[in-house]
Each structure stands twice: as C-alpha cells, then as structure tokens.
Amino acid sequence: MALPDPGASRAVLVGVDKYRHLPSLRPVGRGRDRLAELLRDPTVWGLDQRHVTVLGAQASRDDILTAVKRAARETTDTFLLYFAGHGLRSRGGSAQQLHLALTGADDEHPQIGSIAYHDIREILTAGHQARRRIVLLDCCYSGLAGGMGQQAAPREELQQAAIEGSYLLTSASSTQRAFAHDGRPYPEFTGALIGVLEQGIPSAGPELTLDQTWRAARATLLRRGDPEPQQFGQNAAGQLPWVRNRAHDAPAAGGFRARGPQVSTARRRKAARVLRVLGVPLVTLALATPVIPENPPAQGTDDRASGGRSAAPRVRPSSVVVPSTSPTPSASPTPSSGKTPKQPGPDPTPRTHSADKGVRVSLARSYVGQSGFLSAVAYAPDGRLIAGGSEDGSIYLWNADTAKRVRILSGHSDRITSLAFDPGSSTLASASGDRTVRLWDVSSGTSRHTLSHPGEVYSVAFSPDGGTLVSGGQGDAVRLWSVSDGSALETFDDQKEDVLAVAFSPDGESVLSGSYDRSAAEYDVGGSWTWRDEKLSSDAITAVAYGPKDYVRAAGGYDKVIRTWTGPDSGTKTFKGHTESITALAFSPDGKILASAGLDAIRLWDAQKATPLRTIPGAGSTMDIAFSPDGTHLAGVSGRAVQLWSITR
C-alpha cells in the first residue's frame, strides 16, 4: 500500500516552549524542530518544506487556527497536526475541556491565552477533503481530546467525538500529566515518536503504520515509567502506512551467525509449528483511562493453561536463579500542566514495617549514584557488590555492606536497561539503549567485549555456568553469545515484536523470554524445540524469571498480573494486586518467595500458594529488583538510589 502523497499532504507543528505565567519547556522547541526535520526527510516521509508549517511561542491563537485552516483546505491526502506545550483543563462543569496553552496562558483561568481543542476539532471537521487526519498531542490531560469528558466515555460517544477517518495520539490520559524533562533533548512522548521515526522498527516491513508507531512509542514510555499514551482511531486509519521504516533491510550489526548446521534451525522451526500454543491476541485500543480501586485486594488464583509441548524439558538440580532485568524509569520531569508534582524518592532513614503473614521488611540502607536516575540493579552472587545502572549510561559499583562506591564504569552512550553478574561475580553484563551489550571485568573496571545489536537492548542474563549470555531487545530476536570471546552463537526469532525480558533456566538448557506481542516463549539452547504461548497475557510481558525449584517460570507485564507455571500442560497460577505495570520479577534463592516490582510498589508473594506476603509501599515506583545470594535482602531501584530492604521470615 502506497505512502501518503507528499505533494497532497500538509503538516502543522506547534511547539510552545516559553510561557509568561507557567514554567518554560525547553525540550518542546527541540522536539518540534526535530519532528519537522524528520517529516521532511525523504527516508521518512519527504514532505516539501513549504508544506510543513512550524509555529512557536510567538504564534497567537489566530495565527495557529488560521494555519490549521489553510493547511487543512490544501490537503487532499494526509493532514498532520502536532501540538506540544502545557495542557490545561477547564474548571467546573460535568464535562471538562482541554485547552492548549499558549505563551500567555493562565493556569487559574484556562480560557485565557489558550486554544480550546474543541475549536481545532471544528476546523478539522468543516468539510475538508483530506483522506486522513493525524493529530498528535503532547501535553498534560491530552486524553481529554478523545472524549472531552472527565470520566471514561462509552465507545459510542468516543466514536461520535472522534473525527471521521482520523487518528489521534495523546501523551497522557484525561487525568494524567505529561512530562518534559530539561535533562532530555525532547519531551517524553515526542521523544518516543522521534525515536521510532529515526531508528525504525526492525521487525516491521518497509513502511510503518500509525498503529505500529504508537505501539513502539508506548512500549518505550511504559518501560521508562512514563504515563501511558492514548490512541483514538476510526475507519482503520491506523492500519494505513504513513512513513518509511528506516530499519527495514538495514544490515544487522554484529554479523550474527547460527551455531551448528542449517538443519538445526529447520528442526527448531518444525518443532515450533508443532509445539506452539495457537491463538490470536486481542488488540485493545486505549480509549479511556481504566478506573482502578484505591486499594485493590491482592490475590492469587489457579487457572488451567492450554497445552503445547509434548514433554517437559530436562531438569538438573541447581540453586542458581537468574531473574529478569527491567526497563528504565523516567527522569525527574517537569509536567506540562505548569505544576510540579512531588516526586517519590528513596528514604535514607531505616524503618521497619509491621509483620505481615510472618514476613518483616525494613529499609537497611541506600546506594546513591552520582547523577541522574537509576534504571537497573544487580546483586553479585558472592554478596560483595551491588551494581546500579543510570539513565545517563553510567554504571555504579557499591560495596554491599557499607554502601561505599567502589568505581564507576563508563562507556555506554545511552541509558542502562539491564544488568547481570556472572555466577563467579567476576564479569558484569550491561544492556543499553545505545544498541550494545558490554561485558565488564569487575576487578579492573575495563570493558572486555562490546556486543552490537540492531536496536536497543532491554534485557540480559547469564547461563548458570557463566559461559553464555542471552539478550533481548528491539526486534523479534533472542540472542545467545559466547562470554569468552563475545561471538554470536545462536538467534531465536519466533516472537513477533520486541523482546522485553529474558532469563536462563537453572539447568542452563533453556531460555525464557517475554515480548511486546503479549507472548512468552521458551527455547531449547540446543535448538531441539521451541514453545510459545500467545495467550499467556492480555498485554506486553516485561519481566520473566525462573525459580530454582520445580522448574517454575514466571511472567508479568503491562496487564499488572503475574503468572507462574511449570510446563505447557500445567496449571497457571495468577498473582493479582499490582495497580500499575510490572517491571521486574525475582525468586528468592530457596524459591519460596516471588518478588515483583511495579510502578506502584514492591510486592512479596508466597511462590507456591500465589498469596501475598508483604507490600513495600515505601519503595514507590521501582524499575528493577534483585535478591541477595542468601535471600535476606532485596535491592530495588527507585529514583536516584538503590534501596536495600531487609527481609525477615
């Protein structure tokens, strides 16, 4: 299907970065200008410079509405409108209205110095002949544009409110704020969109649809702990191509080679066809913000899982547990509503929570980085070091007992997404958004090997013998690497979208992965079989882990539910209680406790009974967790520090 005709298409980009009565948003101007460059780029869309109107803080309400009207009238193919800046909500009344704040906007009276989105929508529905209309809103409360109401609107109301043949993407729901952090080049939502346009999607075709773009941007934002973007579309507008995919047919970095003869790959694919759990995943559009109880009960249930593999894999007793690693958090942001919310941060004062079902938890100590927010953590198997990865690409090594910083590892050019120590505690693996994995010598702090990937890398884990590393990231591939020389050993590409989490089994004979395509997959390292469950979750799986006993697997993600199982024909236990997305999972070394981190809190569960043991609300939004080797402590990444929690049973 052809891309939109550049000659018959128009774009109006409005980015208000300076305000008289509200905080200025410096990243907004940079994001607006970069987006304009990409829309003009022939490798993305190729719009003529005359057909891209860029407006900033100097533009008045009439300037903007006139530009929108003129461009919409000239468009016969695709019209795109982008706004970034402060978003305000009208006060009073049963239906709140969204106001796009201009430079003279007044937070107390949103009608002053702003444009009501309703006025823009009226212009876009005034009989113009554009085949498709795309609206991108990066501001607080932008989800109001989809329903223009305070409460979640029914589907039929949203259909009436939406513009026929249109596609609306918003950076937040009707009740959430969007962020523009001064330390980042672009606002969070705009930056995620720019990332997709700049880098493309390795697993997609030569063109990208709006749906693909939204899903990729959504995955990036949720991994960072940012507000979930919303999508509103009609007439299958989101399924039409709109830009070229820069990642299509791009040469894969690193020159991956399969281990063994081609027959191994053929055998694995044949096994996959036989063993795969069939099913079509349900695609749910984010039409409204879900209503979540303030204190929902945490509970566990047993369900039956549909079967797949004919025989359970071989199990070799082992005490090695390789939990999943997790996505990165958002940095300390400026909300685009003009008010700065109180940011949760680590509490350095040790405190004890009351016993709950025989488990006591207290904050033992905190490990603070030099600058920036932390995004990943790993606990050395010998118990001597704790590693923390930062948004700025730095890696900190601390003495676990004293919290004294031992050294800083530098080399990555983007955020650290995952960390893992080898079983001997001599090598540290780090995954990054810079498309590489690095293997570090812990004693000297030098980088031994750099493993190049075709896209961002989200998760790494060592095999129990320390000889193999597994990685997952952008694209549909799970990759195995030789730790000794950094060479590529094997590639499994059975998942359909980005691989967000990976883990090695305790016996080292299989790896488990979770994907944005909602599936969990398990691979025999030798290539003999593949198992994949497309019905395991209702949303992206961002965390996976193996337990040390009974070959227990665990998975969790955006649907806020944890599921454990022991094989394709076993029952699936569900753990419910999180009110926000799950970011990481880890089993205690004895396998009795399953710890889960989320954007709401850290929770401890009875792994066998699927019942809650303890909630650690003081931890706040936590992006990654790791147990100490003796299971008496749990490290969690929160804000600018790693918090170490003492667990007494």
Image (spheres, rainbow, N blue to C red):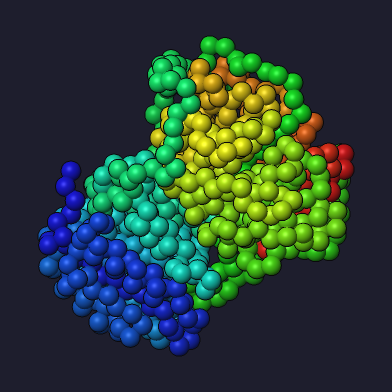
Residue 372 % position (x, y): 62, 66
**292, above or below 350, in the image:** above
Q: Residue 459, how many percent across, how many down?
A: 56, 43
Question: Looking at the image, which is closer to me, 264 or 580?
Answer: 264
Give percent across and percent down for residue 110: 43, 79
Q: Quadrant of the C terminus?
A: top right
Q: In terms of depth relative to the viewer, which is nearer, 109 or 253?
A: 253
The residue sitting at 47% across, 63% down in the picture is 188
Residue 113 found in image quarter: bottom left
Up the image or down, 217 lies above or below 59; here it is: above
Whether 353 is drawn above or below 492: the answer is below
Image-based side of 412 in relation to 110, left or right: right
Residue with the most extreme top position: 310
Q: Nearer the viewer, residue 76 or 317?
A: 317
- The quarter of the picture where the N terminus appears is top left
Task: Confirm whether residue 405 shows in the render.
Answer: yes
Residue 6: image quadrant is: bottom left
Residue depicted at x 53% and y 11%? 310
Query: Nearest the camera: 565 or 249?
Result: 249
Residue 458 in sight:
no
